[in-house]
Image (cartoon, rainbow, N blue to C red):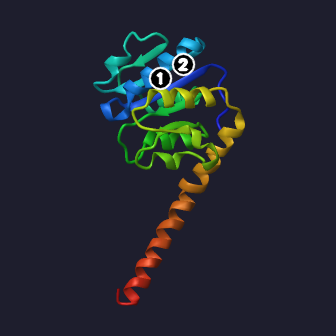
């Protein structure tokens, strides 16, 4: 069962707060969202040089330290959306953990981040380093219902469950075995 949609509208940026994570993009987008929706807050949690950008920003809660697994779980469960506005990426552990709970992520079109978004919700994918697009996506999905969370959870199960990972590894081994048997 997907994590229920929280009553309070909260956006989450978490993890190692380095430039490639797009914390500055998230903060700029949040300022635009906050000008229209004072009920929305942003939590920036983790360590890194970009944390300073969030300090004293209106509507932003900064947790400028390592967050325990238990705290991280609680933060994710209270998040309406997880923001992954990376400027450069391969994949995101924060994103994988979010979708495993059915929590939708707004992601940059960078690296494998788009794999975290169900095909029918492609508006969750935004260009890197584009606060206006991030703002538009958050506006579109901020008041989502359980249907989006169910689709996200189903995607996690279909793509990233241990059964699926084992199936893919087995398939790769079979391909390698066939190549070796064929002399290739």
At 39% from the left and 9% from the top, the residue drawn is: 56
Q: Position of residue 181 (x, y in %)?
A: 40, 89
Q: Residues within 10 Å of mark 2 (few under 14, many from 20)?
A: many
Q: From the viewer's perspective, is residue 166 above or below residue 2?
A: below
At 54% from the left and 19% from the top, the residue drawn is: 33
Q: Position of residue 47 (x, y in %)?
A: 33, 26
Q: Are marks 1 and 2 in contact (CB under 8 Å)?
A: yes
Answer yes or no: is residue 71 visible: no
Q: From the viewer's perspective, is residue 131 above or below residue 176?
A: above
Q: Which residue is mark 2?
A: 33
Q: Which residue is mark 1?
A: 29
Q: Secondary structure at mark 1?
A: helix
Q: How many marks?
A: 2
Q: Secondary structure at mark 2?
A: helix
Q: Is residue 64 left or right of residue 138?
A: left
Quadrant for the N terminus, please.
Answer: top right
């Amino acid at each position: 069962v997907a994590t229920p949609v929280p009553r309070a509208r909260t956006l989450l940026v978490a993890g190692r707060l380095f430039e490639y994570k797009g914390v500055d993009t998230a903060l700029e987008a949040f300022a635009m969202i906050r000008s229209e929706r004072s009920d929305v807050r942003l939590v920036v949690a983790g360590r890194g040089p970009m944390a300073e950008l969030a300090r004293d920003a209106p509507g932003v809660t900064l947790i400028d330290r390592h967050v325990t697994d238990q705290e991280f779980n609680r933060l994710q469960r209270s998040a309406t959306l997880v923001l992954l506005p990376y400027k450069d990426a391969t994949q995101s552990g924060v994103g994988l953990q979010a979708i495993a709970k059915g929590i939708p992520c707004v992601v940059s079109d960078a690296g494998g981040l788009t794999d975290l978004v169900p095909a029918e919700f492609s508006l969750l994918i935004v260009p890197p380093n584009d606060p206006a697009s991030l703002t538009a996506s958050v506006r579109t999905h901020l008041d989502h219902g359980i249907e989006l969370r169910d689709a996200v959870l189903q995607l996690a199960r279909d793509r990233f469950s241990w059964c699926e990972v084992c199936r893919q590894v087995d398939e790769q081994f079979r391909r390698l075995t066939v190549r070796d048997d064929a002399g290739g």
